[in-house]
Amino acid sequence: QVQLRESGGGLVQAGGSLRLSCAASGSIFRINAMGWYRRAPGKQRELVAGITGGYSTQYVDSVKGRFTISRDNAKNTVYLQMNSLKPEDTAVYYCNAEGLLSPGGRGDYWGQGTQVTVSS
């Protein structure tokens, strides 16, 4: 059974850094795109950063220049390096694997979420 497990969240002061990791486990043939979403209190979920199998990346404007997404295809893992964190980055961050191909077929998977809190 495919699972996505995030790690690396926590409490940090404004200006600090955190690195999120998300590892997909199970029998996996290939993952198309991977990404990080976040949901802040009272707000809708938004795509923070995404990366394709060919390593093309995209970012929401508010994190450009501060966050970097990367992936290790051999480990089925995606990372989000977050620098110069701001209080408005506070949210639950979710990992997403899109077009994941396994013996069970193709589908999209989500992690359970990890809390990131940035204090001012």
Image: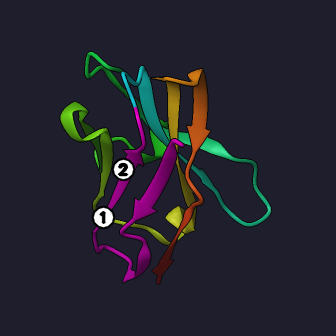
Task: Name the spot of residue 38 as percent of width and height, x first.
Answer: 59, 52
Give the dominant element type of the magenta stretch: helix, strand or loop. Answer: strand
Location of the N terminus (image quadrant): top right
Which residue carries the number 2 mark?
Answer: 23
Determine the image quadrant of residue 43. Answer: bottom right
- Residue at the image position 43 percent from the left and 78 percent from the top: 10
Which residue carries the number 1 mark?
Answer: 84
Pick the residue in front: 40 or 108.
Answer: 108
Direction from residue 111 to residue 80 in the image, left or right: left
Task: Name the spot of residue 82 as percent of width and height, x first.
Answer: 32, 58
**Res. 32 mark:** none
- Residue at the image position 58 percent from the left and 38 percent from the top: 109
Task: Name the spot of residue 52 as percent of width and height, x first.
Answer: 36, 21
Viewer-nearest of labels 2 and 1?
A: 2
Q: Which secondary structure, mark 2?
A: strand
Residue segment shown in magenta: 1-27
- Residue at the image position 48 percent from the left and 49 percent from the top: 4
Direction from residue 40 to residue 111 in the image, left or right: left
Q: Is residue 83 above or below residue 46?
A: below
- Residue at the image position 28 percent from the left and 69 percent from the top: 17
Determine the image quadrant of residue 59. Answer: top left
Pick the residue in front: 73 or 48.
Answer: 73
How many neighbours does mark 2 have within 10 angstroms: few (below 14), some (14-19), or many (20 or more)? some
Q: Which secondary structure, mark 1?
A: loop
Q: Amino acid at mark 1?
A: Ser
Q: Is residue 12 above or below residue 104?
A: below
